[in-house]
Image: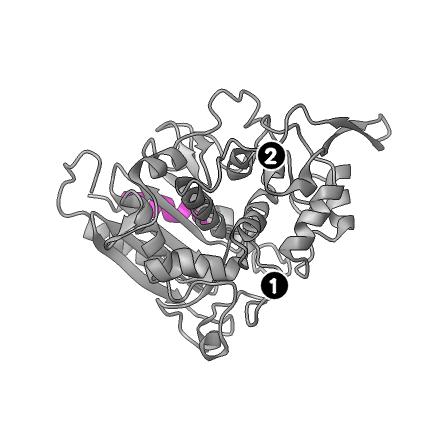
Amino acid sequence: MPADNDLQQPAFNDAALARIDRVIQSEITAGRIPGATLLVERGGKVGLDKAYGSLRPDGTVAMTTDAIFRIYSMTKPIVSVAIMMLAEQGRLLISEPVSHYLPELANLQVAQETVAADGSRTMQLVPCEREMTIQDLLRHTAGLTYGIFGAPTLVKSAYTASGIESRHVTNAKLIACLATLPLAFQPGTTWEYSRATDLLGALLERISGQTLDVYLEEQIFQPLQMHDTGFWVPPEQHHRIAEPFAIDPVTSQPVRLIDVRSRPDFLSGGGGLVSTARDYLRFARMMRNGGELEGVRLLSRKTVEFMTSDHLVGMDQASSAAMYLPGPGYGFGLGFAVRTATGAAYTPGSVGDFHWSGLAGTYFWIDPKEDLIAIWLMQAPEQRDRYRQLVRNLVHASLA
């Protein structure tokens, strides 16, 4: 239910909903993206559940509302929920050092890089001032990074050289690689998008004794009836996979997405899942409802409040990194960007709304004040920033 319990009816402006259709169709007609799905719900009423354009870039098959998309980092909120379920069960404390469960990661060192006048880089290693905690992993302040995003550094080069960026790494190999690599920042100081949630997936495997696919299926997907969500698509459902253009029509860059037609070597807790809009709506409804859906409770109301609060409070330098992806007006909770101000951001919203997105262009947000859920799925990574803003503007304009 909405926080203020006074939403006006109807929940949507019909003329503005029709405009959403026109704008998205014009984007497809212009050849920017092959197709997409958009699902918008407010106050328990679905205002939009639409498929646009084509499932495949050749235009031979129409997009469907049950199309299966690679959701990449929209995997992260699901894995974060799984970790907090363990915390509620008393099986871990998020204040604990990661090395308590993964002793291979004890005694890590931090890289301090120096750039000379000629542009050459040198690096020296210093001890961690404190160990990374599970909370650090959940909020991306563990000191880890990705080797494939952002400006090049010696640490990022070391990531790439280690093989950690390969799709053929496993969660066991992920731990082994990270044990040999320096951290990019002192734990607890800087928000840096990173392998942190992949490491949470490996942690789930270590604690549960199950592979991540089995664990998430039993603990989250089956209870929430998310039947089309997993790490790969079974052969009989391959015809539902949404595909991108081979070359992005705006940037002229090649588009290469993960192969989801068979079980991968790497069950990536940070970016490996596929899903549909209707499946992800069930996860989002559970979060909007304070941890419960249709009589199934995964988390307590207080834990959901905790996860969707800003966990960067008091960390003055946390958002100073060049690639602070939550952006202005947002802090970061435990798996979600969390809005801290009505202004400052690029798009409308409410204090307390929370969201995340995926590399290939998928995006969702939940606005408890407006009792709003929106899920946008496409496969166009080069266009992801534009459409996150465009779709959010259009949806907020439709609220009555």
Whole-Å distance between the Cαs marked 2 and 1?
35 Å
Tag 1: amino acid? Ile
Magenta segment: does it hold 80?
no
Q: Quadrant location of residue 248?
A: bottom right
- Quarter of the image holding residue 54? bottom left
Q: Quadrant of the C terminus?
A: top left
Tag 1 or tag 2, which sits nearer the N-term? 2
| Point 76% across, 49% down: residue | 162
Q: Which residue is mark 1?
A: 247
| Magenta span of residues | 387-397
Q: Residues within 10 Å of mark 2 (few under 14, many from 20)?
A: many
Dominant secondary structure (helix, strand or loop) of the stretch shown in magenta: helix
- 7 is higher (above) or lower (below) than 163: above
Is 103 placed above or below 110 here?
A: below
Picture quarter with the N terminus: top left
Vertical position of residue 125 compared to residue 387: above or below: above
Residue type for callout 2 = Ala
Mark 2 vs mark 1, foreground winner is 2
Vertical side of 187 occupied by 269: above or below? below
Viewer-nearest residue: 124 or 22: 124
**How far across and how far down the image is residue 392, in percent?**
37, 45
- Can you identify the residue that label 2 sits on? 142
Look at the image and name its color scheme.
one colour
Q: Residue at x 53, y 38 (%)?
A: 325
